[in-house]
Image: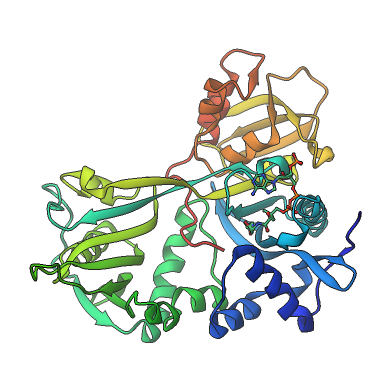
Amino acid sequence: MTYPIRPIREAEWPAFAGVLEEGFGMTPHPSQDARWKAGTEFDRTLAAFDGDTIAGVTSVFSLSMTVPGGALPVAGVTAVSVLPSHRRRGILSSLMRRQLADVRERGESVAALYASEAVIYGRYGYGRASANLSFRMRTQGTEFVAGAPHDPSLRLRVVKPAEARGDYEQVFAAVAGLRPGRYLRKASFWDDVLADGEADQQGAGALRSVVAEDDGGVRGYALFRIKPSWDANGVPDGELSLRELEAVDPAAYALLWRSVLDRDLVSQVHAVSRPVDDPIVALLADPRQLRAGWYDELWVRLVEVDRALAARAYSAPVDVVIGVEDAVCPWNARRWRLSADATGAECKPVDDEPDVSLPVTALGSAYLGDGLLAAQLGAGLVREHTPGTVRSLAAAMAWDPKPWAGLTF
Ligand SMILES: CC(=O)SCCNC(=O)CCNC(=O)[C@H](O)C(C)(C)COP(=O)(O)OP(=O)(O)OC[C@H]1O[C@@H](n2cnc3c(N)ncnc32)[C@H](O)[C@@H]1OP(=O)(O)O
């Protein structure tokens, strides 16, 4: 059975959103629904129809994402859902294939997404490309190492999040280009970050904020909620949930973390989605106190292998023939010579014998610089024909700092 696919019209939003609500089993607050609608690029939605019923949906945000050495237009795949009544009939597969063709036609060479379940998207050529850490810390025992930066010209200011948006945007603009995986936020993304009320109503506490600044202006900010509580013995036991902490320099960064960890009446700090090389790991004298959990983050798909590989920078010179396997985007499935040095990179189709053969997922995993190729060689997932090639390709594709998007889209 086939299900015709087309973008939706704005008037069809309630039916489109209904499929998302059903698939995710959630009931958005009306203001949340309005924000999602405002952020939706209707010409980039896709819906699969069973008669008049929308049975499956997806959509794309047109992102500008930082990659090693620059920024690229990236298709930010989102809002994937299939009605429970129509699951496992191939609707997601048809939507994914159509979407990849559309992305290619628009000239984007890379697609990226956050997966609700890690097992879903490998079959469509997406590889796990970044990871994040979550911390659940007791605030006791979180002293910093000797020599942690301290700038006496810095001070903290308590601000209302709704009034400091311009400061957040300015700090974010200064840091977004420094780390692969970060992407520019359009207004609706900021609206989501700063949305209050709904979470507050669920008992999480109002969104609060401090900024770190000097006479020259704001150098960083922390956004968080506090759930106050006292234990059975009357000892303060509040929990602070960190939403974001961004700073343009190490001293502002350290001061903001200190203000979070030293907050009166708070005994626990919970931070989700922090980078794996978060400087807080180095700042803490006892990093075990982070009680960190590790999660997959962005999944990346090279939609056009040659354009994508030529568009990023490399950490070391490399010259290698890669045999790419790609059943979903067959235009990628051939041999490519990637040559890169400090002056730039090119990727050309060749008929030479490959130095390495790999699935397109492996290139997606390595693309933002997470250094996963060497691990894939160890796991037997890439086949090396010329000894040493995978290690040199892995070293060239690795990047510092590690990729991290930081905000789910
Ligand atoms: C970027 C994002 O938006 S992530 C959000 C994804 N959405 C959700 O998690 C919402 C709840 N889930 C759903 O709506 C659906 O189950 C979906 C979208 C995950 C899958 O849709 P379906 O139409 O059922 O998938 P489809 O029938 O095309 O399946 C294709 C293949 O993927 C497999 N598959 C699909 N979903 C899953 C899953 N959650 N776990 C494991 N395998 C899966 C199928 O078994 C099938 O395998 P096969 O090709 O070997 O037979």
The N terminus lies in which quarter of the figure?
Answer: bottom right
Q: Quadrant of residue 126?
A: top right
Residue 343, visible in the rendered structure:
no
> Percent from the top left, x then y, of residue 64?
61, 62
Tell me if residue 395 comes above or below residue 196 in the rendering: above
Q: Position of residue 60 (x, y in %)?
A: 69, 64
| Image quadrant in which the C terminus is located | bottom right
Quadrant of the image occupied by residue 154: bottom left
Taking the spot 30% from the left edge, 60% from the top edge, the residue there is 270
Image side of residue 387 versus residue 94, left or right: left
Q: Nearer the viewer, residue 325 or 115?
A: 115
Give the image location of residue 61, x and y in percent: 66, 66
The residue lying toward the viewer, choosing from 235 and 180, is 235
Q: Residue at x 53, y 53 (%)?
A: 181
Near-viewer residue (82 or 317): 82
Q: Is residue 64 above or below residue 169?
A: above
> Which color scheme does this rendered protein use?
rainbow
Q: Is residue 178 visible?
A: yes
Residue 337 percent across, percent down from the top left: 72, 28
Q: Is residue 110 above or below residue 162?
A: above
Position of 213 with respect to 327 (left or right) is left
Image: 215 above or below 242: below
Residue 252 lies in quadrant = bottom left
Tell me: 269 left or right of 7: left
